[in-house]
Image: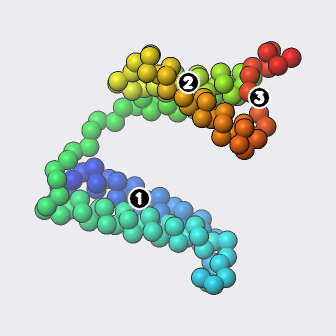
Amino acid sequence: MNIKNHKDFWAGIMFIAFGLFFAGFGLKYSIGTAAKMGPGYFPTALAVIVILLGVVVLAASLSPKAATQRVDRFHFPALLLILGSVVLFSLLLNLLGLMVSLLVLIVISSYASHEYSLKATLLNAAVLIVICFIVFVWALKLQFPIWPSFINN
């Protein structure tokens, strides 16, 4: 087996693994029929589609006509910055509110990029905070603090 496109090969493996993982959970529920779907029908059907997509991507990576691509080195510090910012967001949300917690999340996760720019980060943060406010607070009316608790009191 000659892997021509390593990126597509590993992407196909990932799709297949995720599909098998979720199919395993979907099969624990009643599948039903197409006319009368059970709770496991949709997740299992979606998992099968993901598995098929993985097989297609994996097969294409083995084709002699595939573009030659190697997998780049994995950047663990960037991963830790992004995951850490999400965990920090969840810890700070009740204490600092949505606006400040989102700002912290965006600034820290943006620092993971090799193209980091403070100006672009703050502009991105402003746009994302406005969008999150419109979607989660105004449209969905979710109940969580918007501003830090010491400002609301």
Q: Is residue 112 visible?
A: yes
Please give left or right for residue 99 compared with residue 1 in the image: right
Q: Residue at x 45, y 69 (%)?
A: 49
| Residue type at numbered disc 3 | Pro
SS category of the residue bearing label 2:
helix
Q: Which residue is mark 1?
A: 15
**Visual colour scheme:** rainbow
| Residue type at numbered disc 2 | Ala
Q: Which mark is residue 126?
A: 2
Which of pointers 3 and 1 lies earlier in the amino acid sequence?
A: 1
Q: Residue at x 49, y 22 (%)?
A: 123
| Residue type at numbered disc 1 | Phe
Please state which of the two labelled residues, at mark 3 or mark 1, is closer to the viewer.
3
SS category of the residue bearing label 1:
helix
Q: Which residue is mark 3?
A: 145
Q: Can you give x and y, in whole percent of width and height, for residue 111 in the image? A: 44, 22
SS category of the residue bearing label 3:
loop
Q: Residue at x 34, y 36 (%)?
A: 74
Label 3: few (<14), some (14–19) or many (≥20) C-alpha neighbours in 10 Å: some
Please state which of the two labelled residues, at mark 1 or mark 2, is closer to the viewer.
2
**Viewer-side residue, 115 vs 69:** 115
Q: Can you give x and y, in whole percent of width and height, for residue 115 in the image? A: 35, 24
In the rendered image, the vertical position of residue 11 relative to residue 32, given as above or below: above
**Viewer-side residue, 84 vs 141:** 141
Label 2: few (<14), some (14–19) or many (≥20) C-alpha neighbours in 10 Å: some
Quarter assignment of residue 144: top right
Q: Residue at x 58, y 67 (%)?
A: 43
Q: Quadrant of the N terminus?
A: bottom left
